[in-house]
Image (cartoon, rainbow, N blue to C red):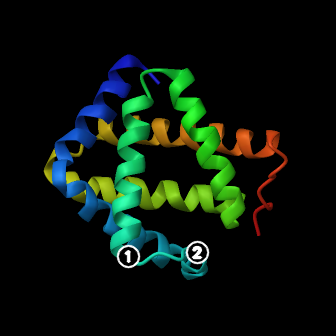
Amino acid sequence: MTPEQVELVRSSYASLGRGSTAMAREFYRRLFALDPTIEDLFTDGPEIMADKFSAELAAIVEAIVSFDVFSARLRDLATRHAGYGVQVRHYRLVGEALVGALAEALGPNWTEAHDTAWRHAYNLVAEVMMAAAAEAGHVPAPEA
């Protein structure tokens, strides 16, 4: 990611403000529409899930400026998600749902540059998480 893309990710997420929770609800709606079986991996209710997701995403976005902090946070997240039953195929679906929810939340402020920056950011997150899970012996199940 370029420094400009990092800043675009950070500033666009910050611009959501309190709307980040609504974006998170939309993220889950999209994710479960893409694969309804993913909902079985969650035990919390929708509001708790949305609050947790928006807080975690804010922390990741904040940490993206320091790869050491960013990767440490993602390693922990990867271990937890592997324990929940996350599979390789889920990462692609999460990326699609996230970018779609962000685009909707930002509306006319969403640009091609936002799309590219967020896709690069998400790909970096997914790569670090999958590598960390594999290193810890939690190899996500192959795509079905």
Q: Where is residue 80 in the image (x, y as percent from the top left)?
A: 64, 54
Where does the C terminus fall, quadrant-wise?
bottom right
- Disc 2: which residue: 38
Residue 86 drawn at (x, y percent) = 67, 62
Q: Which of 140 and 112 is in front in this view?
A: 140
Q: Give the residue drawn at x 59%, y 47%.
A: 77
Give the x, y percent position of residue 62: 36, 32
Camera sees residue 69 = yes
For label 2, the SS is helix
Which picture quadrant has residue 53? Answer: bottom left
Q: Which mark is residue 11?
A: none
Q: Does residue 132 sit above or below 23 in this rendering?
A: above
What residue do we see at 33% from left, 35% from top?
9
Q: Which of marks 1 and 2 is in front?
A: 1
As rendered, which of 3 and 47 lies closer to the eye?
Answer: 47
Mark toward the start of the polypeptide (1 vs 2): 2
Q: In this view, does 112 lie above or below 24?
A: above
Say which amino acid is labelled 2: Ile
Looking at the rendered structure, the secondary structure element under dot 1 is helix
Left or right: 109 with respect to 55? left
Above or below: residue 31 compared with residue 72: below
Q: Estimate the spatial distance between the alpha carbons at disc 1 and disc 2, rounded to whole Å.
A: 13 Å
| Mark 2 nearby-residue class (10 Å; few <14, some 14–19, many ≥20) | some
Q: How crowded is mark 1: few (under 14 residues within 10 Å), some or many (20 or more)?
A: some
Residue 118: image x %, image y %? Answer: 40, 40
Q: 31 left or right of 7?
A: right
- Residue at image point 51% right, 74% down: 34
Q: Residue 46 carries which label?
A: 1
Three-letter amino acid code at the position of disc 1: Pro
